[in-house]
Image (cartoon, rainbow, N blue to C red):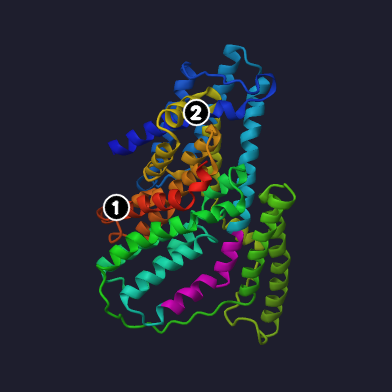
Amino acid sequence: MKSLTGGLAFLLTIIVPALALASGHGEHAGEAVSLTSTTLGYASVALFVFAYILVIFEEKSHLRKSKPVMMAAGIIWVLLALTYRQVGIPAEEAHHGIIHNITEYAELMLFLLSAMTYINSMDERNVFQALRSWLVSRGFSLRIVFWITGFLAFVISPIADNLTTALLMGAVVMAVAKDNKKFVALACINIVVGANAGGAFSPFGDITTLMVWQKGQAAFSDFFCLFVPALFNWVVPAAIMSLCISKETPKAMAETIHMKFGAKRIMFLFLMTIITAVSFHNFLDLPPAAGMMLGLSYLGFFSYYIKVREKRAIEYDRPLGISTECPDDPFDIFRKVARAEWDTLLFFYGVILCVGGLSQFGYLAMVSHQMYDGLGATYANVLVGILSAIVDNIPVMFAVLTMEPHMSLGQWLLVTLTAGVGGSLLSIGSAAGVALMGTARGVYTFGAHLKWTPVVALGYAASIYVHMFLNSSLFH
């Protein structure tokens, strides 16, 4: 617990100063207004630390992580507005600052809302369940299942989020050999590493990569320079762990699940939505979120077609081509929107507003100087990845983006890589790890993962080295 609190405190010394640099507006624009020594500034930092400690203990307290950070965000901006009045800064500055942060959040939220709705729609159409049933019924050996689930985690997470990917692959592992505790623990570690590594080379694969892309620090195609480093991040520990897995073949399960009507077309529409978002950003200089919302309308019209078709199926005894599993309540896109991870989306709101408020106090500018000027960009970016294993990588990355240290493209890709894969070092370092601890409760635990942390760290180091070697031209 001391390490968590200590890591959090150190993170704040890294997170809090550069926000003032990034958020200046009006007649004070461009000036680094430092209010770091004010009483209300200290109170704001303490409030954020307390809120984040509650987030860390979410699994024990069952208090949703969005609640403490949302409250902290509101109070921090109240304290900031009061501080501005005390020192004579115009009230409009606080107004412009919070609008700037809300705009950043709105773009992120709309993008994720569209993606989550598509994922939920594919889930309802049995896309993921069909994949799971196919894998379970093949009769593969445990070692082959280990490699297949890790590889699929690596290739699916760039499109779906790492949480969904981990839950899907975790369900396969539990269905194949839930009584083999050693296999389940190793397979879950492999899935977590694979899912986090896969998300690191895609603008859509992780919240942190999405933030870097939307902020304009790297172009869409630049992220694919991280494919080989991310692959090493997964393959190195997977190869070592696979040596400890037997080649026994568990009994195949006779389980068959078919995709529902329209599933393949929804997958195609999701691909078209991604293309639309990229086109908005690359060719029209419009926010990717606007392209994603246009893509969501594709699903909206197609969902109407599914609803009409399934209503007819109910009324006329389900004609050929309509799934016999068709529900009495036809497909409704707004139910898929309602099923989005609202706790996660509101958590992002709280984090962005908290860090934004602390930045206005001037803490991030100070930390940026200490970290990037003191340690140097490479060491600082490697440290960011290690911190993301202790603290959620979203506030860490948002802090770095807000600090905007002067770095080459290679360094921006390095911090994107480390923030994405650093969470694999501990089971609590990513949503994928936390989710699998719930799925394989008592088998895949913090301690079970910690035993293999040195092996995962080899992959972490290998990915950094490979990136700096292969993409050396980007560091100039």
Q: Is residue 424 visible?
A: yes
- Check disc 2: other Cα within 10 Å, few if <14, some if 14-19, many if 20+: many
Residue at 47% across, 46% down: 414
Is 320 situated left or right of 232 in this image?
A: right
Predominant secondary structure in magenta? Answer: helix
Picture coordinates of residue 154, whole percent (x, y): 45, 63
- Mark toward the start of the polypeptide (1 vs 2): 2
Quarter-of-image position of residue 249: bottom left
Q: Amino acid at mark 2?
A: Leu
Check residue 453 in the rendering and tell me which mark sits there, or answer none. 1
Pointers 1 and 2 in contact (C-beta within 8 Å): no
- Check disc 1: other Cα within 10 Å, few if <14, some if 14-19, many if 20+: some
State yes or no: residue 129 in magenta: yes
Determine whether 250 is above or below 233 in the image: below
Task: List the residue tagged with mark 2.
Answer: 364
Determine whether 129 is above or below 77 in the image: below
Kind of element beneath mark 1? helix
Magenta part of the chain: 117-135
